[in-house]
Image (cartoon, grey):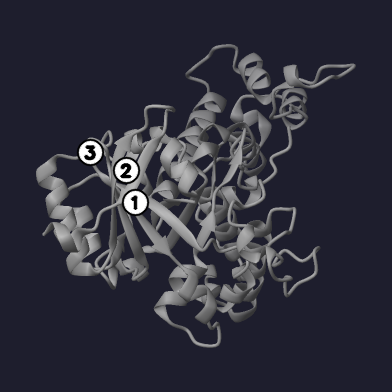
Amino acid sequence: MRNQRKTPSWGWYYNEKESKFDIKDYRNWAYKGDWANHYINEMAKLAVKNNKSIYEVAWKFIKDKEEHLPPKLYKFYPLNINSLKCIESDSIYLNSPQYFNDPYDCHISANEDEFVKKYVLSHIEQTNPEKSGINKEQYIRLLSSVCFDVEKHLFRDIPITFERAMREITDGNYDSELYRIQREGTTIFEKTLLNLKDNDIKVTSFAALDDIKLSTYIEMWGHYADSHKGFCVEYDFNDYIKNSDNTLENLNNTIMSCLLPIIYKSKPREVPIDLFYKKALNNKLTAFQENHFKKFLLQNYLTKSSAWSYENEWRLILTQNECEKYNNMLPFPYIKAIYLGYGMSLENKEYMYKLAMRKGISVYDCALRDDSYELNFYEKQILFLL
């Protein structure tokens, strides 16, 4: 099944006026393809041209995504000191991907067999087949081997896989030179993956919901709001969308330009093996290759399993250097409302009422509906309660 993005639930926001762009232009809100991928490609091109990183030029493209930016996003929080600090200071906290609940989140994928094959063949070519313990025929067998699951393809003559070729040539001799090289390549591959996952980026996530989904996506409350004992914040971007200006480099544009939707797929994206190989062996990359590699990393950070598609996630990704300027708490002055979880204690609710009143934020309490499996949110008139 093709991975197609659904028409945004906020499409109504632009329905009343025509787009500034042609329907085939990725900047058009009704564009049918993967607009975010085009957006990232354009940033990468400018980054190469100006000899800068993608993140350094991102703010110049804020107008290009204006019609795709939802007028509001939601974020679920457990109730604790850190989440309350975000409300008090009108900020957002960005975290390292290594702390996420999905082990595949921000996972960098590459073809391990292709990498190890390239590593083994490179070693053989730098010496000679005999020194590696193989003859010319075995070398050709390795060279012509394939690095994919042949059982998933139809072939008249089934090709030999690299894994099988290695197994047959080493014949289970774990002390052989060829097997040692294979293990060495595997170790380098695995270490590179770990290092890339700990790359210099910080992330925070939002959900593109409407009022109905906020009430019906009960699992979101269970997963991210401490089993309904936490709260959800509505961030409103209407004023920003109307007043955004990409002629000036400012923090708001830097942040909003790096806010992008997740692409849900059945399989992870794979980084091109030639780029991955050079990076793993610390070979120097050209400016074009370096930005090309970072583009693929960013696309990986924005790709998740289809199993998570119900979350309609948008993700803010910034460099660690940018985040450290603000101690990972970036200004995010877009809070419009707070929705309290059904399981929040009365004492905590009273605290949240006072906080909302002090900040001039609408606050909604929650009840269970008797006629459906939905949450019923109703606004609290806090001025009369306190």
Is 332 drawn above or below residue 208 in the view shown?
below
Q: Which residue type does callout 2 highlight?
A: Tyr
On the rendered structure, is 225 left or right of 49? left
From the top left corner, tell me how far across and down residue 7 is, in percent. Answer: 67, 50
From the top left corner, tell me how far across and down residue 347 is, in percent. Answer: 9, 45
What secondary structure is marked by label 2?
A: helix
What secondary structure is marked by label 3?
A: loop
Chain-order first, disc 3 or disc 1: 1
Q: Nearer the viewer, residue 213 or 149?
A: 213
Quickly name the residue at label 3: 229
Quickly name the residue at label 1: 96
Q: CA distance from mark 3 to mark 1?
A: 24 Å
Q: Do residues under tags 1 and 2 come within 8 Å of each other at their CB atoms?
A: yes
Quickly name the residue at label 2: 99
Answer whether residue 8 is visible to the viewer in this image.
Answer: yes
**Residue visible at 54% across and 61% down in the picture:** 70
